Image (tube, helix red, strand yellow):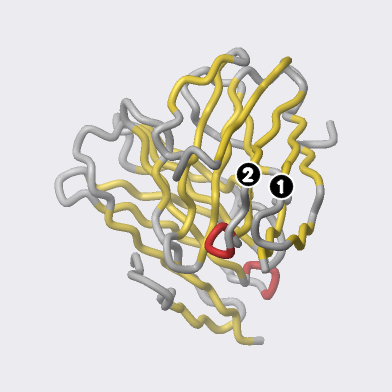
Amino acid sequence: GESVGLHLPTLSVQEGDNSIINCAYSNSASDYFIWYKQESGKGPQFIIDIRSNMDKRQGQRVTVLLNKTVKHLSLQIAATQPGDSAVYFCAEKGNTPLVFGKGTRLSVIA
Amino acid sequence: DAGVIQSPRHEVTEMGQEVTLRCKPISGHNSLFWYRQTMMRGLELLIYFNNNVPIDDSGMPEDRFSAKMPNASFSTLKIQPSEPRDSAVYFCASSSTGRGEKLFFGSGTQLSVL
């Protein structure tokens, strides 16, 4: 989920398990959503995106689910690997540029 | 493609000094964005350009901040005078979609103002 202030929510997952990172977005007019991964010392890296006319989209080991009724977005990572450890951001877009959430830290336990 | 290139990677300066951050977007991308990232406020949009023209600078914190895009392959973000509260990581991103979707980010400039 999203965070307030200094403390990012942290999700700890055993290597090989599936991860689910959640995001609540704020603007019901948003029609485009995107997930980014940010590793320490690097810029955000695109993972997957979805438009509001879809409720699910799959990539390689990742799936994004969109529930417009409750304004909820989730990122599922299958068979989580140590290299998946990072901060994950969701972002939404309507008539304005992308607005980013505060992020969730994913920690993979080997 | 080399991706979005930012320089410098790190900048340490004293309060009151001028700071200039540089960005080279991905070739062929027509939109460029400047973001600032802090622990407290996350990723905040400062300004963005479409086809080298500033579209929305409402995120620029104060008149001390200015940004230019003289051509399609170069942009600068300038802070003058700099203050300690400007310390943050500044990211540049570019996009080819025209709607500002699917941004590609640079590695950022870590700015420390003492």
User: Which label is found at residue B19?
Assistant: 1
Depth check, mark 2 against mark 1: the one in front is 2
Q: Which chain carries label 2?
A: B
Q: Which residue type does callout 2 highlight? A: Gln
Could you say where residue B112 lies in the image, as x and y percent from the top left? 68, 64
Name of the residue lying farthest toward the front:
B16
Q: At 32% from the left edge and 25% from the top edge, which residue is drawn?
A: A95
Helix or strand or loop: what does disc 2 sit on?
Answer: loop
Q: Quadrant of the C terminus of chain A?
A: bottom right
Between B2 and A76, the residue placed more toward the observer is B2
Q: Which residue type does callout 1 highlight? A: Val
Mark-to-mark CA distance, 2 and 1: 7 Å
B29 relative position to A91: left or right = right
User: For residue A38, which quarter of the picture?
Assistant: bottom right
User: Which label is found at residue B73?
Assistant: none
Helix or strand or loop: what does disc 1 sit on?
Answer: strand
Could you say where residue B23 lies in the image, as x and y percent from the top left? 74, 35
Could you say where residue A54 lies in the image, as x and y percent from the top left? 33, 34
Q: Quadrant of the N terminus of chain A?
A: bottom left
Q: At 37% from the left edge and 41% from the top edge, which residue is drawn?
A: A92
B82 relative position to A1: left or right = right
Between A83 and B83, the residue placed more toward the observer is B83
Name of the residue lying farthest toward the left:
A69
At label 2, counting other C-alpha atoms closer than 10 Å, the crowd grade (few under 14, some 14-19, many 20 or more) is: some
Between B54 and A33, the residue placed more toward the observer is B54
Q: At 55% from the left edge and 50% from the top edge, which residue is drawn?
A: B36
Q: Do the residues labelled 2 and 1 touch (CB within 8 Å)?
A: yes
Q: Look at mark 2 in the image and give the residue it sits on.
A: B80
Q: At 63% from the left edge and 37% from the top edge, which residue is drawn?
A: B93
Q: Earlier in the sequence, mark 2 or mark 1?
A: 1
Could you say where residue B4 lies in the image, as x and y percent from the top left? 74, 37
A63 relative position to A74: left or right = right
